[in-house]
Amino acid sequence: MTEELVEDSAGAVLPVPAAPPVQRLAEVEPARDDRPPREKILDGAQDVFSLHGYSGSSLRMIAAHVSVSHPGLLHHFPSKASLLDAVIDRLEARAQHALDALPEVRADRGSLTRWIEAVLDPAADANELLSVLDTEAVNPDFPGRFRISRLRRVYEHILLQCFERAATGGGLREGVDAGFAARAVLSMVMGHAVRERSVRPLQRRPHADDPRRDVRQLLSVLLTDDDD
Amino acid sequence: MTEELVEDSAGAVLPVPAAPPVQRLAEVEPARDDRPPREKILDGAQDVFSLHGYSGSSLRMIAAHVSVSHPGLLHHFPSKASLLDAVIDRLEARAQHALDALPEVRADRGSLTRWIEAVLDPAADANELLSVLDTEAVNPDFPGRFRISRLRRVYEHILLQCFERAATGGGLREGVDAGFAARAVLSMVMGHAVRERSVRPLQRRPHADDPRRDVRQLLSVLLTDDDD
């Protein structure tokens, strides 16, 4: 890769940082000790899975991150897979909550946009975690494979309902298919969730690429204006 | 998560497969023994990294996958990190090739669309591999972090040039920003590359969700018709 790819005059390509700023595990979240031990361990497991992936994590890493002894952790969760199950329980509860709330959301563009932005913020911890586990689900040996793939489909289903409701009122832009729109938004959320933690921390100066604004612009391209 | 989320009448949510069909490493690619050992090992490392991620892979897994002895592998690559470097060299060469070819591509919508589809096919092996390594780059301890994040920016830069050229001829849809369009397409390619190997193999019947068609539809939403 030639040098002009690294540093170009337009600043479009990532400059090489002398010492890239990094967010390491220890910085992720200060321990809040009022949490019950099980919740504290689960919060910690989410942090560790979200940075290292399930396959790159160990029970020892999680125990050290939450300042619990290894036997203490094993008392609550006998295996890494049981921790993953409990973490996915939380992600599923979040999706279920969104699904339950959906019928209350008004079908105009503004209401749907605000709601989708709140549920599928690429910078939200839960979506960053999902983007990592989702990628691990390409591996047939990943124990969370089926539940995580299903979760992706659940969010696509939620988005599909949003776009179908918009379409009923003529709110879907001409030539846009609701299923396509659902998959497009979800891939942007997953892709931008990764981008927020890969590209973003290596940027030396501010860029006009807020992921929430990108989601909003995508929705504005897929949906018609309310006054059309 | 309630049962109707798993199996609903509209078939929008993923059904539970009795025995999900899986693609395991042994099925990925039959060994082609006419390759030089170094190339064979690199091809195998790409397969293993692409399924297990860098952090979930080991030199022993790669040696077994390509039927080379562990010392034989170490002769060519002394460490997992050196294999990753060589794998990223290949990905960078591919991006460089696309960058070099870009000036020859005509700026009309049809030509740009066909070219982007060819370079950024979500189902292409290289893009599936990139989507996995890209996700691992959220971890500051991932040794390929900087080069992979830069690679993402290079593809965004390529797409930005495409959309800026389209914009010069009035080919960018009103209200669409070229930088947004570049990030949107790349996140769809990365997100759909994951989806092809997580959701797709668990679907029991065909769905009208070809990832290439989604990329094409996204481009058609971002670009104006040639005859506008």
Image (cartoon, coloured by chain):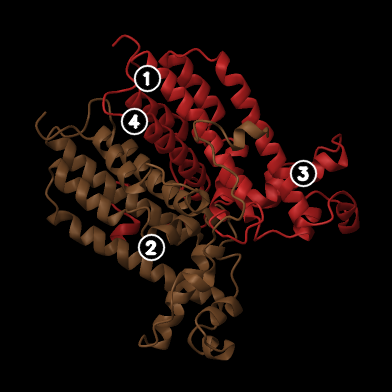
Chain colours: A brown, B red
Kind of residue sitting beneath label 3: Leu
Q: Earlier in the sequence, mark 4 or mark 3?
A: 3
Q: Quadrant of residue A38?
A: bottom left
Residue on which the image places disc 1: B167
Residue that carries the numbered disc 3 in the rendered image: B42
For marks 3 and 1 on the same chain, the one whose residue lies earlier in the sequence = 3
Name the subunit of mark 3: B
Q: In this rendering, do the residues under marks 3 and 1 share a single chain?
A: yes
- What residue sits right under mark 2 in the picture? A126
User: Where is A47 relative to B37, above or below?
Assistant: below
Q: Nearer the viewer, residue A83 or B156?
A: B156
Task: Please name the amino acid that badge 1 sits on.
Answer: Ala
* For discs 4 and 2, the disc positioned in front in the rendered view: 4
Q: Judge depth for marks 4 and 3 and give the one in front.
A: 4
Residue B2 shows up from this direction: no
Query: Type of residue at label 2?
Result: Ala
Q: CA distance from mark 1 to mark 4?
A: 9 Å
